[in-house]
Image: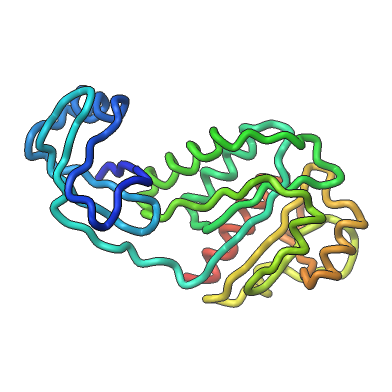
């Protein structure tokens, strides 16, 4: 099954017309014709089954024949991850986290961040592609880049964790995860969180954790955290 995405399709939609690029892909590459089946999602949990009625390479149109709501995970995972110096590393994290299972992502700008200007358009496309590839009907929410000091003062639900590398008293994240519980996890930049940032996070009820015995890159740490949560909820 190949999954297509459009935020514009709703529960009341009866027909859907694809944009030119996807229309060409459907008709020319996939060689779909009248009566062939396509699957679409709006990224909000709905899976639509549709039949092609107009196989036009510029405006392929399909009729919605059925829809169903894909079951949602019984926990919400929010990862706040500092941007990496190289964009492709952050994109790798976005892709893998979407495949594993994540609900929202916030790029956080920290004291040691080497990249402080972020363009999120490409990140959005990475998330959409990973959602379709993994046949998920839930598109993770990509929040606007936020300063660390502003982020930790927000209101959160569930358990709060900060993963850092300082030699302080920390427990294993895997041992603290409670199934079916919402989580927010902070992952720092290549130079780690500053001591002041860690102190501020602790004052705001974030629990310090370790992700293992070895020192991990930012994107690797984020993927490990995401997988640990998914594994603990199986």
Residue lying farthest front?
12
Q: Is residue 216 above or below residue 36?
A: below
- Count of number-bearing discs: 0
* Residue at the spot 38% in from the left edge and 43% down from the top edge: 133
Residue 50, position as x, y percentages in the image: 17, 46
- Rendered-image quadrant of the N terminus: top left
Residue lying farthest left?
35
**Left or right: 106 in relation to 38:** right
- Which image quarter: residue 178? bottom right
Residue 164, position as x, y percentages in the image: 80, 57
Q: Is residue 205 above or below residue 230?
A: below
Residue 233, position as x, y percentages in the image: 51, 71
- Which image quarter: residue 228? bottom right
Q: Is residue 29 above or below residue 181?
A: above
Query: Which of 219 and 182 lies nearest the eye of the viewer?
Result: 182
Query: Which of 2 and 146 lies nearest the eye of the viewer?
Result: 146
* Residue at the spot 55% in from the left edge and 34% down from the top edge: 121
**Left or right: 133 in relation to 56:** right
> In the rendered view, how is the structure colored?
rainbow
**Left or right: 142 in relation to 174:** left
Residue 216, position as x, y percentages in the image: 73, 48
* Residue at the spot 7% in from the left edge and 39% down from the top edge: 35
Query: Which of 148 and 30 lies nearest the eye of the viewer?
Result: 148
Q: Is residue 191 above or below residue 206?
A: above
């Amino acid at each position: 099954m190949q999954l297509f995405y459009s935020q514009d399709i709703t529960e009341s939609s009866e027909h859907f017309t694809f944009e030119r690029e996807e229309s060409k892909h459907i008709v020319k590459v996939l060689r779909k014709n009248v009566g062939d089946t396509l699957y679409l999602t709006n990224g909000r949990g709905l899976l639509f089954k549709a039949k092609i009625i107009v196989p036009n390479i510029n405006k392929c149109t399909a009729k919605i024949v059925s829809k169903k709501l894909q079951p949602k995970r019984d926990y919400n995972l929010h990862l706040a991850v500092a941007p990496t110096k190289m964009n492709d590393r952050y994109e790798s994290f976005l892709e893998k986290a979407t495949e594993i299972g994540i609900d929202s992502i916030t790029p956080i700008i920290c004291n040691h961040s080497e990249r402080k200007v972020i363009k999120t358009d490409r990140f959005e496309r990475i998330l959409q592609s990973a959602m379709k590839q993994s046949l998920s009907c839930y598109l993770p929410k990509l929040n606007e880049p936020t300063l660390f000091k502003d982020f930790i003062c927000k209101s959160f639900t569930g358990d709060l964790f900060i993963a850092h590398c300082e030699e302080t008293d920390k427990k294993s994240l895997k041992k603290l995860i409670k199934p079916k519980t919402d989580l927010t996890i902070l992952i720092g930049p290549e130079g780690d969180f500053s001591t002041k940032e860690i102190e501020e996070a602790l004052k705001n009820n974030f629990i310090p954790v370790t992700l293992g015995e070895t020192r991990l890159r930012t994107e690797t740490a984020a993927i490990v955290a995401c997988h640990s949560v998914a594994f603990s909820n199986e």
